[in-house]
Image (cartoon, rainbow, N blue to C red):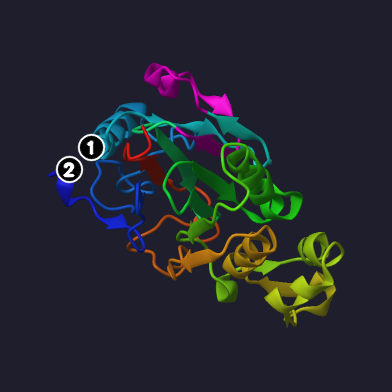
Amino acid sequence: MNGGLLRITGTPWPGVHYFCSTRQGGVSAEPYSSLNLATHVNDNVEKVALNRARFEALLPGPPQWLEQVHGVDVAEFNSDAPSQCRSSVVCADAAVTTRSQCVLAILTADCLPVVLADEAGSVLGVAHAGWRGLATGVLENTIAAMRKHLKPQSVLRAWIGPGISQPAFEVGPEVRAAFVDADASTSVYFVQRYAKYPAVGQKWLADLPGLARHRLWAAGVANIELSGHCTFRESALFYSYRRTPHTGRMATVAWLNGATD
C-alpha cells in the first residue's frame, strides 16, 4: 500500500532520488484529508504519525524534518556518521548534505519546494521558498552552502516542485517591491490586478515559480525544471494554504543514492 502513494517528480537525475507527496493516501480527516505530514497544523497527532510511517516506508531512512520559519538559514548534514542525519529538528528553511541516504525534507502548501544538486550527484540541497524566503536569499544561501563542497566548474541543476501559480497568487505592493526594488528586471513576474473595490488598494498577481527560476539562473544554476503543478487549483492532489488556511502539508524529499561514497 505504501508503494501506491502518489509521487510527483521530474526528470531522473544521476545520483539523486527526489519527489513530492500529494494529499492522497493517508488517514487524516477533514480539513487535513488525507496524507497530512505536518505536526504543527493541529491535526490529530496519532494520524500524522501513521501518515509519516506510510510515507517513510518509501524512503531509505527517516527524513530530516526542519522547523521552517520563512527564513534563509541552511542546515548542513555532512557528518561522517550517518546517524547525524537523524538528529532532532532544527530551525531552518533549507538543508544541504553530501551524505548518501540522508533524506532531506521540506513541507509546503503553496510555497515552492526546490531541490538542487550538482550534475555528478555529489551534493544535495533542498529549500522552502515562499516569497519572503525568495526575496531575502534562501536559494542563494543554499547554493553557497553547496558550493563549499564543489569544484568551481561544477554544474548545478534544480527542480521547482508544486506551488501556487500566478493566476492564484494575489499579493500587495509590498511583495512586488521586495523583488523589484532590488532587481528591476523581476517586474515581468508581476501582473497588475485592478481591485473590484479601489479602496482595497493595488494588487498584483505574482509568478512565484518564475521568480524562483529567475533567481536560480542569476545564481548560476544551468538546468532548471518546473513541475507545472498548481497547489491552489489542483485541490484533489495538493494542500493549499491560500485555498484553505486550516489544512495539511505535502513533503518534498530528496537523497543521494550513494554514488559518491
Is residue 199 shown left or right of residue 45? right
Residue 163 in the image: above or below residue 106: below
x then y, percent, for residue 115: 48, 51
Residue 70 in the image: above or below residue 208: above
Furthest residue to the left? 1
Q: How far apart are marks 2 and 1 (CA)?
A: 5 Å
Instruction: Look at the image and say whether residue 119 sits in the magenta stretch.
Output: no
Report the magenta residues as a range: 77-98
Is residue 21 shown left or right of residue 125? left
Instruction: Look at the image and say whether residue 90 sits in the magenta stretch.
Output: yes
Q: How many neighbours does mark 1 have within 10 angstroms: few (below 14), some (14-19), or many (20 or more)?
A: some
Amino acid identity at mark 2: Asn
Sequence order check: which comes first, mark 2 or mark 1? 2
- Mark sitting on residue 54: 1
The residue beneath circle 2 is 2
* Rendered residue at 82%/79% (across/down): 198
Quick one: SS at disc 1?
helix
Amino acid identity at mark 1: Arg
The one nearer the camera, 131 or 203, is: 131
Q: How many labels does the image show?
A: 2
The one nearer the camera, 222 or 246, is: 222
x then y, percent, for residue 113: 50, 52
| Contact (Cβ within 8 Å) of mark 2 with mark 1 | yes
x then y, percent, for residue 56: 28, 35
